[in-house]
Image (spheres, rainbow, N blue to C red):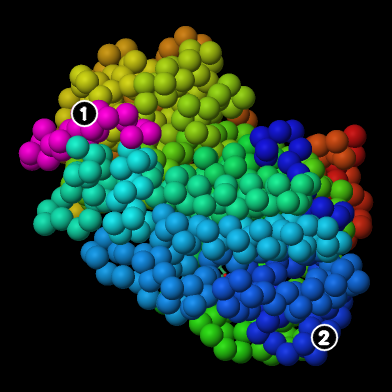
């Protein structure tokens, strides 16, 4: 559904969403009244409730206590606050596990996880599926027409904290899934290459999940198990969704994604984006020295892309520090607003948090919230209230779409495949390549859409492919078509190598990308730890600075491509390192080593020029400028993540919405500030 022109929006919500996970069951009811008073004061428009409440709603099998939730939803309704109502199926009650201990998942090493946390679920378990369907049905029947109900929030972050179970029930389910994918045991033997190391199966019944093996297990089996685990979670989601659609027609159904590549690795969000009515996402800053605002922008762009470009909703982020990293810094003044409005600039229809009121007990009592332990006389509360007021001024952007300049190809399945053991170098990391290529485009002030490798790319002048190890023949044809029709493509090393079964494409590397890139790779030549190579421009090629690569080199044989930089040292010394191939009306670049920072910027800058995208030279570093456009107009977001005041040139006058002041040709954006201009015309 999100791929239609306008995705469904939470029912009855006529403003941007602002609020958070609300867990009032942790508090006496008198606190609820203070909560809603403060919500109104801060401009809260929607809260997520009931996500972990199964044990309270169904205290014994088949006995329900909805009284507290009735009172809560009524209270929200009379206060004009919309409810995103959870199905609590991520947290089955203790009684359920006493009756069905086999519904606790088994790790790859054969360890049975225990009750006492959350998310301990074997998603193949028939009793679990039945109990989840039942509580979902009870909630749908009771609240389908409750006036506070805006949206259903199924489960919580499928795939986190674990995505796969390796028990005997899953083995049976996996065999069934394999029949659907491959048809027969012979086809599985062929796809998995079981002739290798004598792994041949006579019947599907001999096949187990890829449990811990003495040395490396079959890679294709592991890849199929990752697909199976993802599909199993999706079966669970769609079962709940279909109950909700049937019993509560017209109420959108979502489940909160975690698209950031560092936060949930096991979900193929391309497939999930097609199943939800409205894409929603959770995002937390990973404060390990990375530029957190760049990582945030990337996650937001990826979320918008799995929503097919349609508006989506940030369902959780944090007001200040989290509590699950080794070190959990507080956010700096203004950082929360910059984070929130960056998500909004990149397509979110609001900004919501985990959680409303900081818990006194339990595992998350040191995680920040909208109402901190310090109460309302606190910086966090003042910033929360200010953000609520700011979002109230931006209603007009609802329904508009973020405008992108370029696309980056991303495929979770390719990532899973290249993350398996015994690859040419453990220093190669597909996620790192995606982060680094994204950061380079971010620093050139380009807004990036992500695209599936088989998607239509014709709308983009520039397409960047950071590391697409697994690429189908259709992907090869797609990229060739894209370039022939005038596109500019940039492909990094270790792309186009294997097919969907992790089998190397016949002939020299890079398999399905040989034609479009105009070259072959005779041999991979990864570098030693810490080793670097120097790249120079060869005689006759346009001059450029020397570049330095690390981690990887290829022995490249040009077959139509021109050499733009060549290796000055290393095993491939004198051979091409960075090439450019003119094909049809377009150009395809190949980067055969790991370039980062200014070295990668230099190459991408050339490709940007080939693509005919003008350089955004007037913008300062770490000043994010993004546009949303639609029927209500064009909105320019300028977010200054730097410590220096700056100015942004406007191509039309307009009104700055947060200050209400007119904006002419140059918009002042003080250090740390956000400005949103509605452009005239
Ligand atoms: C999310 C989760 C929330 C809360 C939050 C803390 O992943 O959905 O329930 O645990 O993390 O950062």
Residue 564, quarter of the rendered image? top left
Q: What span is in magenta?
A: 179-202
Rendered location of residue 12, percent (x, y): 86, 55
Q: Main secondary structure of the magenta part?
A: helix
Q: Residue at x 52, y 70 (%)?
A: 92
Marks 1 and 2: CB-CB under 8 Å?
no
Which label was assigned to residue 34?
A: 2
- Of the image marks 1 and 2, the number of the one nearer the N terminus: 2
Rendered location of residue 331, percent (x, y): 60, 74
Residue at far left of view: 198
Q: CA distance from mark 1 to mark 2?
A: 65 Å
Residue at far top of view: 584
Residue at far front of view: 62
Pointer 1: what residue?
186
Please say whether residue 350 is visible from this viewpoint.
Answer: no
Whether residue 404 appears in magenta in the rendering, the answer is no
Q: Residue at x 18, y 48 (%)?
A: 217
């Amino acid at each position: 559904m999100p791929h239609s022109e306008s995705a469904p929006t939470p029912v009855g919500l006529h403003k941007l969403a602002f609020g958070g996970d609300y867990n009032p069951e942790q508090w006496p009811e008198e606190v609820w009244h203070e909560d809603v008073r403060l919500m109104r004061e801060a401009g809260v428009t929607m809260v997520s409730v009931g996500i972990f409440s199964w044990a309270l709603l169904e205290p014994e099998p088949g006995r329900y206590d909805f009284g507290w939730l009735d009172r809560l939803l009524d209270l929200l309704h009379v206060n004009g606050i919309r409810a995103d109502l959870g199905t609590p199926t991520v947290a089955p009650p203790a009684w359920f596990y006493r009756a069905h201990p086999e519904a606790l998942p088994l790790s790859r090493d054969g360890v049975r996880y225990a009750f006492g946390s959350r998310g301990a679920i074997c998603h193949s378990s028939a009793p679990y599926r039945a109990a989840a369907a039942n509580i979902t049905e009870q909630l749908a029947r009771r609240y389908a027409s409750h006036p506070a109900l805006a949206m259903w929030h199924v489960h919580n972050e499928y795939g986190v904290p674990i995505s796969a179970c390796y028990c005997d029930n899953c083995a049976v389910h996996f065999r069934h899934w394999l029949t659907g994918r491959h048809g027969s045991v012979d086809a599985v033997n062929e796809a998995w290459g079981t002739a290798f190391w004598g792994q041949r199966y006579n019947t599907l019944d001999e096949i187990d999940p890829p449990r811990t093996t003495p040395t490396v297990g079959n890679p294709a089996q592991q890849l199929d198990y990752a697909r199976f685990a993802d599909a199993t979670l999706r079966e669970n989601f769609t079962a709940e969704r279909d109950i909700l659609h049937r019993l509560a027609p017209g109420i959108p159904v979502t489940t909160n994604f975690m698209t950031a590549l560092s936060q949930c690795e096991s979900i193929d969000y391309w497939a999930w984006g097609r199943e939800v009515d409205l894409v929603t996402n959770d995002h937390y800053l990973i404060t390990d020295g990375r530029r957190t605002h760049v990582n945030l922008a990337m996650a937001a762009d990826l979320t918008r892309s799995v929503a097919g470009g349609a508006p989506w909703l940030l369902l959780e982020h944090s007001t200040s520090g989290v509590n699950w990293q080794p070190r959990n810094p507080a956010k700096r003044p203004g950082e929360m607003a910059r984070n929130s409005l960056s998500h909004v600039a990149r397509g979110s229809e609001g900004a919501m948090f985990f959680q409303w009121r900081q818990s006194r007990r339990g595992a998350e009592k040191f995680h920040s919230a909208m109402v901190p332990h310090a109460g309302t006389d606190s910086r966090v509360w003042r910033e929360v209230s200010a953000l609520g007021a700011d979002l109230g001024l931006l209603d007009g952007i609802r329904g508009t779409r973020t405008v992108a300049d370029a696309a980056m190809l991303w495929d979770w399945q390719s990532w899973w495949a290249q993350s398996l053991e015994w690859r040419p170098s453990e220093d190669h990391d597909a996620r790192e390549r995606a982060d680094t290529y994204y950061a380079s485009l971010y620093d050139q002030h380009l807004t990036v859409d992500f695209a599936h490798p088989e998607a239509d790319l014709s709308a983009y002048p520039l397409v960047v492919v950071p590391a697409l190890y697994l690429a189908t023949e259709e992907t090869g044809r797609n990229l060739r078509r894209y370039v022939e029709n005038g596109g500019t493509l940039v492909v990094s090393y270790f792309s186009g190598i294997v097919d969907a079964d992790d089998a190397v494409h016949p002939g020299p590397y890079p398999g399905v990308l040989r034609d479009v890139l105009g070259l072959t790779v005779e041999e991979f030549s990864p570098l030693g730890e810490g080793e670097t190579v120097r790249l120079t421009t060869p005689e006759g090629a346009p001059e450029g600075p020397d570049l330095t690569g690390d981690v990887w080199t290829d022995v490249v044989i040009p077959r139509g491509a021109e050499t733009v930089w060549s290796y000055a040292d290393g095993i491939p010394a004198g051979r091409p390192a960075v090439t450019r191939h003119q094909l049809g009306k377009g150009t395809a670049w190949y980067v055969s080593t790991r370039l980062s920072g200014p070295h990668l910027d230099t190459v991408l800058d050339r490709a940007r020029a080939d693509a005919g995208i003008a350089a955004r030279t007037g913008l300062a570093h770490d000043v994010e400028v993004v546009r949303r456009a639609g029927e209500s107009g064009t909105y320019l977001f300028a977010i200054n993540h730097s410590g220096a005041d700056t100015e942004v040139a406007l191509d039309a006058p307009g009104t700055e919405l947060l200050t209400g002041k007119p904006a002419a040709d140059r918009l002042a954006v003080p250090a740390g500030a956000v400005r949103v201009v509605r452009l005239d015309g």
